[in-house]
């Protein structure tokens, strides 16, 4: 008579474990972030993000070739402009750095899915994600500029608009502007549940987007709040979001699961810059096995319910998947 369950039967061999594995990471799940800068001949490593580079437009092609050869199908493009001003006008300039990058990528690789990050912080001299008046980031005034930015990115050829600014009503404002400009077919990937996180540090070095005064806590979410994230997500769904994102990833896996259970839209998790840098630093010291740790994290995102993973590890993961090892073992 059996006194207990024998879970170990299904773990007996590698083949047995393969048979019963519940979650998998596919190269199609990955989105690779790309940083484009003004200038020529630039391929410069970002010091706090080893293996991630600033590329000038003329050197984008070598990077794209590598990405495509690895089977990665989707890119998230960030522009680092040469000039910043109070309104972030380079964000919506027709010949802005990101607009030129998008059209160049689409011309060379029409099948790549190009996702445009829609925010102002790389482009404003104060480094905030919207217009500032009397020290406060103005919501409704910012919406108009963000909508303009989205339309300019759509005109440049973006396949998905991904607003990361955390102004209230940004999905509705961008949806309306896109529809009126003839882009009713373009989906919006909303950074719906975005926390005011210290895990963005290395990214702000890379994008030169650190706020010059204060912080982002009047618009990004308090890390202590979960129910509020559900309200954010519900509002974005009501306004017409096509994807819902949770950001950062690791410390917010519960939010991935909560959104997965509550909403039927594709869920995206952003494995952000410091999550990447921590692994890179530890691996460089020989303190962990980078490949195993990264793959464990990736399958963890899938298990939590993410459909898509935006990650600086994407090229490494794609390479490892090609080697035929689709999860940690
Ligand atoms: C800008 C933006 C940020 C990130 C993506 N878009 C930083 C921020 O909100 O300050 C962070 C990405 C990362 O850390 O990898 N709105
Ligand atoms: Zn921003």
Image: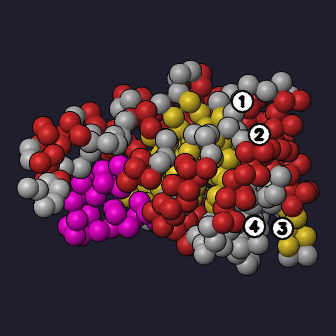
Q: Is residue 81 left or right of residue 8?
A: right
Q: Which residue is mark 3?
A: 137
| Total number of numbered discs in the rendering | 4
Mark 3 close to ligand 2, CB under 8 Å: no
Coordinates of residue 214 in the picture (x, y in percent):
73, 78
150 relative position to 57: left or right: right
Residue depth check, mark 3 versus mark 4: number of the one nearer the observer: 4
* Residue 116 as seen in the image, left or right of residue 5: right
Q: Nearer the viewer, mark 3 or mark 2?
A: 2
| Separation (CA) of disc 4 from disc 2 | 20 Å
The disc at residue 186 is: 1
Please report contact status of discs 3 and 1: CB closer than 8 Å, yes or no. Answer: no
Say which element carries label 3: strand
Question: In the image, which residues are magenta?
Answer: 273-299
Element marked by disc 2: loop
The residue pinned by badge 4 equals: 219
Q: Quadrant of residue 188?
A: top right
Ligand 1 placement by image quarter: bottom right
Residue 129 to residue 317: above or below: below
Mark 3 or mark 4, earlier in chain = 3
């Amino acid at each position: 008579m059996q006194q207990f369950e024998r879970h170990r039967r299904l773990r007996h061999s590698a083949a047995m474990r393969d048979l019963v594995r519940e979650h998998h990471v596919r190269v199609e799940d990955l989105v690779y972030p790309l940083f484009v800068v003004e200038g020529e001949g630039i391929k410069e490593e970002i010091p706090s993000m080893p293996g991630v580079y600033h590329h000038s437009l003329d050197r984008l092609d070598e990077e794209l070739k590598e990405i495509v050869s690895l089977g990665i199908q989707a890119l998230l493009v960030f522009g680092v402009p040469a000039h910043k001003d109070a309104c972030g006008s380079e964000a919506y300039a027709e010949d802005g750095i990101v607009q030129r990058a998008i059209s160049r990528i689409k011309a060379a690789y029409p099948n790549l899915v190009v996702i445009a990050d829609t925010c102002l912080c790389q482009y404003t001299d104060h480094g905030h994600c919207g217009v500032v008046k009397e020290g406060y980031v103005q919501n409704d005034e910012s919406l108009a500029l963000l909508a303009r930015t989205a339309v300019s990115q759509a005109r440049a050829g973006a396949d998905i608009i991904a607003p990361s600014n955390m102004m209230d009503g940004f999905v509705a404002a961008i949806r309306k502007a896109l529809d009126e400009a003839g882009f009713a077919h373009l989906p919006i990937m909303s950074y719906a549940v975005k926390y005011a996180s210290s895990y963005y540090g290395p990214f702000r070095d890379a994008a030169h987007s650190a706020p010059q005064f204060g912080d982002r806590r009047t618009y990004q979410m308090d890390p202590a709040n979960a129910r509020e994230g559900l309200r954010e997500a519900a509002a974005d769904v009501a306004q017409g979001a096509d994807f819902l994102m949770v950001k950062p990833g690791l410390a917010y896996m519960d939010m991935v699961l909560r959104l997965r259970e509550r909403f039927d839209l594709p869920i995206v998790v952003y494995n952000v810059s410091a999550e990447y840098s921590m692994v890179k630093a530890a691996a460089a010291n020989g303190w962990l096995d980078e490949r195993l740790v990264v793959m464990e994290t990736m399958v963890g995102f899938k298990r939590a319910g993410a459909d898509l993973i935006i990650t600086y590890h994407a090229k490494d993961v794609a390479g490892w998947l090609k080697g035929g090892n689709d999860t940690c073992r």
